[in-house]
Every structure is written in structure tokens, then in C-alpha cells.
Amino acid sequence: MVSVTLEKIIALSKRRGFVFPTSELYGGLASSYDYGPQGAELLRNIRNLWWDEMVTRRVDMVGIDTQILLHPQTWVASGHVNAFNDPLVEDKITHKRYRADHLIAEWLRKHPQPEEIVVEDLDLAQMAGLIERLNILSPDGNPVFPPKAFNIMFQTAIGVVEGEKQPVYLRGETAQGIFTNFTNLLNSTRLQLPFGVGQIGKSFRNEITTGQFVFRTLEFEQAEIEYFFDPEASDWRQLFEEWRAAMWSFITGTMGIRAENLRWRRHSDQERSHYSRETYDLEYNFPFGFKELWGIAYRSDFDLRQHAEFSGRDMRYTDPRSGRQFLPHVFEPAVGINRLLFMALCDAYWEDLDNQRVVLRLKPALAPYKAAVFPLLKNKPELVAKAGEVFKRVARRFSATWDERGNIGKRYYAQDEIGTPFCITIDFQTLDDETVTVRERDTMVQERVATADLGSYLHSKIEED
Ligand code: GAP
């Protein structure tokens, strides 16, 4: 196996229309990326699979779609205004800023120390001490100032008249829109504990550039769940384990990610917030090592309590049997859709050295297109017309793409690189007997299939996977 590097993923993403640097025309924008035709399809597939499995197919879940701009008090109550801080250090020469914890972790990786140092547990003063003691330098080899905390909420303003603008924040997470609607959700549905609310949407954080592609960006999409339960009626450990199993099953089963590239990391007591009883990260082995993919935190009743206090409203749930009123506790499984896409690209990347091709071995459910349709020759109108008919037939049920340029081998290889599981070629024999050649991506095996059977053929093959 040839190893997957960040450079290879970035190059493939650009070459094949998955991910482009934002505003490249003007020299780019820090930690910002656009998604090309293939990337947009892959994101859409990931989003839909998540929503389908986590919301639609569960009786205990509903969805919600809340605003990016919320009342600014939301972020005071949630603690983001005061506590959403990243420790940053500044290079004394270039004045570039870096995440102190990332800089220390990277330094320790290259310069292992005899004692065990858990970077996640360090506070600002401890980081400063370590930077001084170990003489940790910036990536440019310069000394750095001691770390300081920077708030990473993006601020903007409502209103058009200068001096009368009201400052607001772009949301730093989608979760708060769920908590602030808790009473509306209770009043407008027949939900009873335990139940959960899922949301997919954009979040924004003024992150410091780290050059890890779409792993950490300023604007990103989150898929978050708040799962509410009665701590007196439920065994929280069991519920928590059920959620961890659901996350694992989505990643390994639905997305087909290899288990050897995944691991759980339990947060230490120091790392966890004071109100959190348990937090785990599901980590993926990205080209730069194991990093957080999907977190699950037991947040107690912290958020509802804060919003009840700051709004002065009663946000308690009434138990329909006993009439007992209380603030439910909550688990929060939170993942980034863009990070899932990045993981999918890394995990699927395969260099088939025997056949000198790069293949994205994506599960068909994830693949931007399930099938590509080719007329064998572009300059034969009867083949192009027949291929057009086949395309229409296939595209009614499956996302499909079309290619009529160049030789067939090149067309196959281009589809391999975007992960299309099946290529369908319309040739002269098709005009005689209404059959086409279907070529499978990973094995390169070709079969003759009747055009009338294409739908059921593709369906059974895709279901098989
Ligand atoms: N509400 C909890 C919360 O937001 P988080 O660990 O800060 O928790 C959840 O974020 C997930 O969102 C992360 O596990 C990651 O997948 C994704 N994420 C967070 N910050 C991100 C960023 N700057 N760029 C891309 N994805 C990010």
C-alpha cells in the first residue's frame, strides 16, 4: 500500500473538482475552501445519510433548522463569549499566530520528553512554562511570546446606520439554536423523554490557520444532536453507550470507513468542562495523525439551566405520568460534515500500482455519481442519441454523469479518481441488441447488461455494498 499524504489528497481534490481554495483568484482566503461539483455531491450525500440515519429513521429524533444569527445573549448564556477562547502564541519576529497547544504537541512529537505531557490538560500558565523550559520555537524557528486566550467568535452587526448597529455573532456551533427552542419544541410536538433534536448547518469560528486543509476552517458545517433524557429515569451510561455505538455504526457501516483508522479517546477530568460527566472523541487517523472527528459529551442540564437563568423563562419539562417538573440532561454528539468528507477522501484513496491508476474506493452511497454513461464515439450521432436515452433512464434513479471526450480508457480512469462505481458504455452492439457494457470501478471487471435491466442491476450492486 502506498501511504496517503495530505499533498496527494489536496492535489486530487483540486484536479477532480472536490475542493478548491476559496478566492484563489485573489490569492486565497485563510482556512477557507470551496467545494467543486464532486465535492458538493459528496457533501450532499454525507448530509443526507446522516439526516436519514440520525433523524428520519428514529422515532425518538426530530430535526430543526435554526438561524446563523441568534440573539447575542444566547452566546453570553452559553459561555461562548467568555470562554470560547483559543490559546495563541505569536512569533516574535514574523508576528504570525499559532495555536499554542498545537505548537506544543507538534514540538513534543518531534522532541519526545522523558515525562508524559498531556497537552489537552495544560492551562495557559503551564503552556507558557513549557514553552520557556523546552525552548519551543515557531514553525519559522523563532521564539514566541507567552500564550494568550483569543475569543474565536465572529462578530458582525445588524442595522445600517453607523453608531446604531447592534453587534451580533455568527454562530460558533449549531447546538445553541436547539436549546433556545427547547420550549417551542415541547409545545409544538408530542415528544416525550428521552428524545433528541438534530440539526445540520453552517458554523463559524475565527480559527488560526493551521494548514490542515478542510480539517479546521473558518466556516464549516456541523451536524449536531442534543439528546434529552431524565437522569432519574434513565441509566445514562447505557444511553451514552448506545449513542457511541450509533456513531461507530454510521462511520464504519454507512460510510464504510476502515475500523483500523479509528479510535476512541476519552477526555481526562482536566480536559472536560466542569458540568460534563463524560466526553469521548471518535478520532480518525488523518495524514497528520489521529485527530477528533466526532465528539460526544454528557453536558448535564448546563445549557438549559443557563438559558432559563439568562432569559428568566421556565424551561422545565413536565413528566406526563408523575407531573414532576425538571430540566432534562443532555448528550451532545457533534460532528463536522466537512471533516467527514476529508476522512472519506483519505480512507478511500488508493493507488492501484498494477494498473497505474488512482481510485477513490468510496462506498457507492457516498460516491458523487453512482454511474457514468459514455457513448463509445462522440462523432457517431446514433451512439450519442442512444447513450442519451440510457443516461435519462439511469439518472431517473441514480445520480449519474456523462462523458464523451477522448478514449474510453482515459474516461474510466477519470471516473476512478472521483469514485464512480459503475461506467456504462454504449457501443455498436447496443444498437443491435439493447445491451451495454458495465465496468466496475475496483475490479475493472466488465459485464454485458440489457438496458432494460440497468436499474435493477445497479440497485442490487449498490445495495450489496
Ligand atoms: N456543540 C459542540 C461543538 O461544537 P466541537 O468539538 O467544537 O463541539 C464539533 O465541534 C465538531 O465540529 C468537531 O468534532 C469537528 O468535527 C467539527 N468542527 C469543529 N470546529 C471545526 C472547524 N473549525 N472546521 C471544521 N470542522 C470543525
Image (tube, rainbow, N blue to C red):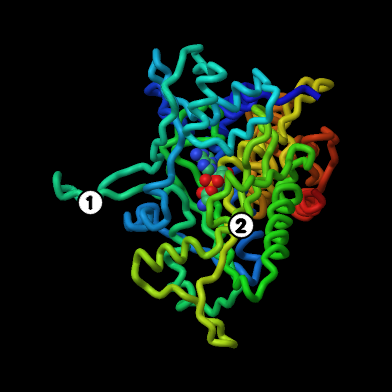
Q: Nearer the viewer, mark 1 or mark 2?
A: 2
Quadrant (top left/top right/bottom left/bottom right) for the N terminus? top right
Q: Which residue is mark 2?
A: 277
Q: How many marks?
A: 2
Q: Is residue 33 visible?
A: yes
Look at 15% across and 50% down and name the residue there.
164
**Residue nearest the observer in this picture, 158 or 117:** 117
Look at 41% across and 36% down and name the residue there.
149
Q: Amino acid at mark 1?
A: Gln
Residue 136 in the figure: left or right of residue 161? right
Q: Is residue 375 visible?
A: no
Kindly state the secondary structure of the residue where label 2 is placed: loop
Q: Position of residue 159 (x, y in %)?
A: 20, 51
Kindly state the secondary structure of the residue where label 1 is placed: strand
Q: Residues within 10 Å of mark 2 (few under 14, many from 20)?
A: few
State the CA–CA distance, disc 1 to disc 2: 37 Å
Q: Position of residue 292 (x, y in %)?
A: 62, 40
Residue 223 in the figure: left or right of residue 310? right
Query: Which quarter of the picture shows residue 256?
Result: top right
Q: Which residue is mark 1?
A: 166
**Residue nearest the observer in this picture, 391 or 219:** 219
Figure check: 312 above or below 178 = below
Q: Position of residue 385 (x, y in %)?
A: 64, 41
